Image (tube, grey):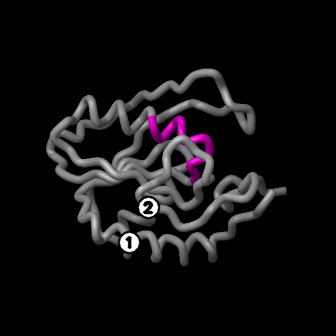
Amino acid sequence: MIFYSYDEFSKDVEVMAKDLQSFGCDAIVAIARGGMTLGHFLAEHMSIRNLYSLNSVHYDNQKKLEYIKVYNIPDLSKSKKVVIVDDIIDSGETMYEITLLLEKRFPEVEFKNAAIFYKPNSLIKPDFAVKEAKGWIEFFWSKAEN
């Protein structure tokens, strides 16, 4: 297990925000819960007011479930370019399903996806990523205080 600290995250958000400038997104959709912190920090760094979230369930703690449930989908009909963010693209199934769902629901919107970490053998490679995951990541926002 690898601990991912706030200091690392802060540096990685700056890198990702600079990379995302080339896409010119006008909205961010954070996948709850893992993508919420990244979405918020990117929105602040990029001065984007249109920050949304949606929910998906694909894991029960570290156990992968047999299904992906997506709900609380925001209305993106007024957006032109949207980046979908999550903390990690592990199998890629969640990001893949959410991207397909949003593209189908909002065909006039251009979607890209971003994650701090990705695994090279995942179903999809993120359009924007900072680090390759080499094991289970314990994010600073998930660490239980003792």
* Residue drawn 60% across the image and 53% down it: 120
Whether residue 31 sits left or right of residue 101 in the image: it is right
Q: Which residue sits furthest front?
A: 121
Q: Looking at the picture, tell me which residue is in the foreground, 18 or 47.
A: 18
Q: Which residue sits furthest top?
A: 66
Q: Which residue sits furthest right?
A: 146
* Residue drawn 35% across the image and 47% down it: 52
Instruction: Give the quarter of the image for residue 61.
Output: top right
Examine the structure image and report whether residue 90 is included in the region drawn in magenta.
yes
- Give the x, y percent position of residue 62: 74, 38
Residue that numbered label 1 is attached to: 19
| Label 2 Cα crowd, 10 Å radius (few <14 / some 14-19 / many 20+) | many
Instruction: Give the quarter of the image for residue 139.
Output: bottom right
Residue that numbered label 2 is attached to: 128
Magenta stretch, residue numbers: 88-96
**Amino acid bearing label 1:** Asp
Q: Earlier in the sequence, mark 1 or mark 2?
A: 1
* Residue drawn 53% across the image and 67% down it: 130
Name the quarter where the N terminus is drawn.
Answer: bottom right
- Give the x, y percent position of residue 13: 49, 71
